């Protein structure tokens, strides 16, 4: 049996709900409408590993604004298209899936890229 390094991070995978896709479709009405069931790839974020999983949403409150803006930016790079963000809108737009164990199955060293 192989053992794999465990990263000292908690992962949250962000899955768009129907209201998120309704917003995307309103921004780009001439495009083929997007639906949650058509999505095959999701953004994941690595968070500090000291999260309390009894209250994962409470732990996410430190990061939600950055995550929300990144998810919106992935769909429209024009902030004028974005809705007014709030914690309640974040929760209506996204389902969050948490994992406190993140294994690195790659053989290459980790590389960090910064996009500006």
Image (cartoon, rainbow, N blue to C red):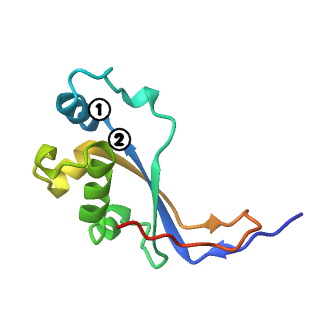
Label 2 sits on residue: 16
Using the image, determine if residue 7 lies above or below residue 96. Answer: below
Determine whether, in the image, residue 33 is placed left or right of residue 29.
right
Say left or right for 103 vs 38. right
Residue 5 sits in quarter:
bottom right
Q: Quadrant of residue 64?
A: bottom left
Residue beneath the point at 42% across and 72% down = 52
Say which residue appears at 30% left-offset and 68% top-offset. 63
Residue 66: quarter of image: bottom left
Q: Residue 14: image x %, image y %? A: 40, 50
The C terminus - image quarter: bottom left
Q: Secondary structure at mark 1?
A: helix
Q: Left or right: where does residue 76 sit relative to residue 106?
A: left
Label 1 CA crowd tier, 10 Å (few <14, some 14–19, many 20+): some
The image shows residue 111 at horizontal and vertical percentages of: 59, 72
Give the residue number, with chain letter if any, for mark 1. 18
Quadrant where the N terminus is found in the figure: bottom right
Is residue 94 left or right of 53 when viewed as pictured? left
């Amino acid at each position: 049996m192989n053992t794999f390094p465990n990263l000292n991070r908690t992962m949250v995978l962000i899955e768009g709900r129907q209201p998120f896709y309704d917003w995307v479709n309103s921004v780009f009405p001439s495009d083929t409408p997007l639906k949650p069931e058509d999505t095959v790839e999701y953004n994941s974020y690595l968070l500090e590993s000291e999260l309390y999983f009894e209250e994962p949403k409470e732990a996410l409150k430190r990061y939600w604004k950055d995550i929300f803006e990144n998810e919106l930016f992935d769909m429209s790079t024009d902030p004028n298209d974005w809705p007014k963000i709030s914690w309640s809108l974040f929760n209506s737009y996204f389902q969050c899936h948490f994992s406190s164990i993140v294994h690195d199955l790659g053989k290459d060293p980790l590389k960090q890229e910064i996009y500006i």
